[in-house]
Structure formats: structure tokens, C-alpha cells
Amino acid sequence: MRGARYYNVQLYWHGRKILSLWPYRTRLKLERRWTFRGRSERLRRGVHVWVVWPAYGTVKHPRYGRMLGLSKFRFVPR
């Protein structure tokens, strides 16, 4: 997004937010496990929803634009 300094990416599973990141690049690679709000998280079997917003200003004083994307994917472990 033109002018965006970074992005806010959120990942949900069964309606519960399990990840929120603020990457500076337009690409993001999920790790196998991560910690969010003091809990150990990972991709679980089922449908996940991700949402992305552009962010302007500083991390301390963000201004978010309109949602850039919302999509779903199904994770099926091997």
C-alpha cells in the first residue's frame, strides 16, 4: 500500500485471535510456534482467518487505513 510504514496482520482460529504482528514488509512467514498474549500458539487443524491493515505514522502513534485483505485458509497437518 502506497505510503504505509508497516502493516497490522491478525490471525484468528475459531473466532479467537491467536496472532497479531506489525511487519514492515509485504510478506510474512509463519513459524511453527509462537507466543501471543503469554500463550504458546501454533497452527491448528481447521479454518484460520487472517486480516491485514496498512499502518501510517509510528508504532507508538499508529493510524490505520482501510482493511487491505481478509481471507481464510484451511490447515490440515500431515
Image (tube, rainbow, N blue to C red):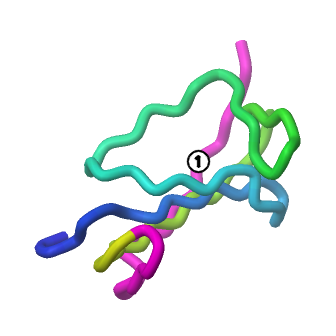
Q: Position of residue 6 (x, y in %)?
A: 32, 62
Q: Is residue 30 above or below residue 18?
A: above
Range of residues picked out in magenta = 59-78
Residue at 81% over, 51% down: 37
Residue 49 % position (x, y): 63, 58
Task: Point out residue 62 in the picture as x, y percentages from the top left corner.
Answer: 42, 79
Q: Is residue 27 above or below residue 77?
A: below
Instruction: Identify the residue at horizontal 59%, vertical 60% (top origin).
Output: 10
Front residue (pair 49, 32): 32
Residue 77 on the magenta segment: yes
Q: Which residue does the numbered mark 1 point to in the structure image?
A: 73
Q: Quadrant of residue 76?
A: top right
Query: Against 12, is 69 above or below?
Result: below
- Left or right of 9? Residue 55 is left
- Disc 1 element: strand
What is the quadrant of residue 69 in the picture?
A: bottom left
Q: Is residue 73 left or right of residue 54?
A: right
Left or right of 1 in this view: 39 = right
Q: Quadrant of the C terminus?
A: top right
The N terminus lies in quadrant: bottom left
What's under tag 1, amino acid-wise? Phe
How many numbered circles does the render carry?
A: 1
Q: Using the image as rendered, state which of residue 24 and residue 61 is in the foreground.
A: 61
User: In the image as oriented, which residue stretches furthest toward the front?
Assistant: 60
